[in-house]
Image (tube, rainbow, N blue to C red):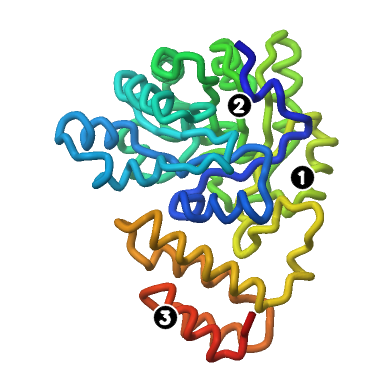
Amino acid sequence: MESFWEKLVRPIMMLAPMADVTDAAFRRVIAQYGKPDVLWTEFCSADGLWHTRVKHGVPDAENALMDDLAFHVSERPIVAQFFTADPAMMEYAAGVASELGFDGVDINMGCPDRTVEARGAGAALMKDHGLAREIIRAAKRGAGRLPVSVKTRIGYARDEVATWLPVLLAEDLAAVTLHARTRKEMSLVPARWEHVAEAVRLRDAMGVSTVILGNGDVRDLADAQARVDASHADGAMLGRAIFGNPWCFNRDVRVEDVPFAERFRVMLEHARLFEQLLPRKRFAVMRRHFKAYASNFHGAAELRAALMKTESSDEAEEVVRAAGFHW
């Protein structure tokens, strides 16, 4: 059965999965104002999903992890991303993604978070190729007909593309997203997209059809196109470029041309969706977005400071209107 990956027009432009950023509320806003070719959920703990739903029997309507996996039809195609070091947990989570109607399953093998790595998951899987293969195969068993992909890095402490990528490609993955830095480098050095080009060459030499996607330091769609052209990747993933800019993937809109009143109207729409769709999340998560929306204008610092004290979308609206912005 043909997967959605094979139907996408190249280059594929995607929004990166980011914890406490690309949640259900933000994705709904992005889908409305500048939809990328593919959306990802925030990464979700496969272990946590099993423990809450199976071991403890938490009803889905009361389960914060299920809030993270909620999506709207406007977001399709959408991929559920999971992390774990336990093949059984991955198989279970992939099965849940299939039941919920996701378009694909992605395995996080690049997250440098210490708590994730301490469990043997995320970037730690780059150090255990055998377990990484088991995790992929388990995801495929659980996902059924859904395509399985991996998001990873060029290596753990050094460049290991030549040894690490073939391990992944041998598992017949639908796609691999390569963050062009090592785990050790975090985001402290410029992304080296020459390694994305190396990954493309390895893919072609192996004669497999896995989609190769690059990630790291992509400023906007024009920059993404230039990096794709240079590396011959199938597409690019944008992350930080989205902060405060729901129009990032909209080729007809430049955020610089959007009046600040309209930016704040969308910000408040985002905040209300956050309250509606994610009732178990602290409003402090939403306030992180306020910092990005309220920037690059005279008086931005004062407005940001006031917004960071708000506890609801109504309070945030009062602050914005008091600052003189109306729509």
Residue 250 marker: none
Q: Secondary structure at mark 3?
A: helix
Residue 12 is drawn in which quadrant? top right
Q: Quick check: 130 above or below 177?
A: above
x then y, percent, for residue 154? 60, 32
Q: Position of residue 200 (x, y in %)?
A: 74, 23
In the picture of the structure, the residue carrying the numbered disc 2 is 176
Looking at the rendered structure, the kind of residue marked 2 is Val
Q: Position of residue 269 (x, y in %)?
A: 53, 66
Q: Quadrant of the C terminus?
A: bottom right
| Mark 3 surroundings: few (<14), some (14-19) or many (≥20) residues within 10 A | few
Say which quarter of the image contains residue 177. Answer: top right
Residue at 47% across, 34% down: 80
Name the outermost residue toward the left.
56
Disc 1 marks which residue?
Answer: 224
251 relative to 57, above or below: below
Dot 2: element:
strand
Residue 205 shown left or right of residue 269 in the figure: right
Q: What distance separates the C-alpha of mark 1 from that of mark 2?
A: 17 Å
Residue that lies at the very extreme toward the top in this rendered image = 207
Residue mark closest to the camera, 2 vs 3: 3
Task: Tell me the CA gap for discs 1 and 3.
Answer: 37 Å
Estimate the x, y position of residue 11 in percent, counting from the top left: 78, 34
Front-most of residues 162 and 249: 249
Between 201 and 23, the one nearer to me in the picture: 23
Q: Amino acid at mark 3?
A: Glu
Front residue of 192/241: it is 241
Q: Is residue 195 left or right of residue 140?
A: right
Q: Which residue is mark 3?
A: 315
